[in-house]
Image (cartoon, rainbow, N blue to C red):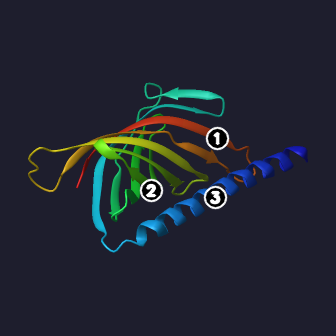
Amino acid sequence: MKRAALRMRKAMGARALLTAMLMLMSLLGLAAAANAQVTVGGHVGVVFPWVTRGGGVTTTIADRFQMGFPIGVTFKGQSPLALDLEMIPSIGSNPQTVTLTVDPGVVWGFSHGIGVGMRMAFDVNSFQFGFIPLVNKSWDFKEPKGIFKRYFVEADFPVKFNRPPFLPGNNSFTFATHFGLGF
């Protein structure tokens, strides 16, 4: 009985964190929506999760190769805040899997192409959800030819909560890098 109560407390804590993050993202999004001019852009890329710690086990990309292909649409007003709606189809080996993560978030742009942000993460057809703090750096192409205006590298730090019903839950932390092109 104590184990069920502890599990319920953990689940409620994770839900409270998720609710707080969604409220913060909503408030930040409302501040950005107040501006009249909104530009729409996006990005495509590839992401590699280098190391994951979860359930008492550390897994590296050498243990289980995995890569994702992020696609995002970005809405930016006159403020440094941008709303970024991203999806990441991923493939993995050992066992072979195909997954989809939907991870909307906000990115605050600083000078010199540096940005920091926070995304919510929802794994489709899974009991896993979480959040992803990120830091990125972008560089503009000197002479853009075509739709791409810049390239970037991003460090992602996903924290995920896995809560299957009637089974013990676990949490994981990952370090990943995302390389891409922005338009």
Element type at mark 2: strand
Front residue of 98 and 33? 33
Give the labeled residue for mark 3. Answer: 20
Report how far apart the C-alphas of labels 3 and 1 lie in the structure: 18 Å
Front residue of 101 and 126? 101
**Residue at point 55%, 49% (across, down):** 131
Answer with the quarter of the image where residue 22 lies.
bottom right
Q: Which mark is residue 106?
A: 2
Element type at mark 1: strand
Foreground mark, 1 or 2, reads: 2
Image position of 31 with respect to 94: above or below: below
Report how far apart the C-alphas of labels 1 and 2 lie in the structure: 23 Å
- Where residue 157 appears, as percent x and y from the top left, is 50, 39
Image position of 136 with respect to 36: above or below: above
Foreground mark, 3 or 1, reads: 3
**Residue at point 58%, 45% (across, down):** 160
- Where residue 46 appears, as percent x and y from the top left, is 32, 42
What's under tag 3, amino acid-wise?
A: Ala
Q: Residues within 10 Å of mark 1 (few under 14, many from 20)?
A: some
What's under tag 2, amino acid-wise?
A: Val
Element type at mark 3: helix
Give the labeled residue for mark 1. Answer: 171
Front residue of 109 and 91? 109
- Mark 1 or 2 closer to N-term? 2
Image position of 163 with respect to 173: above or below: below
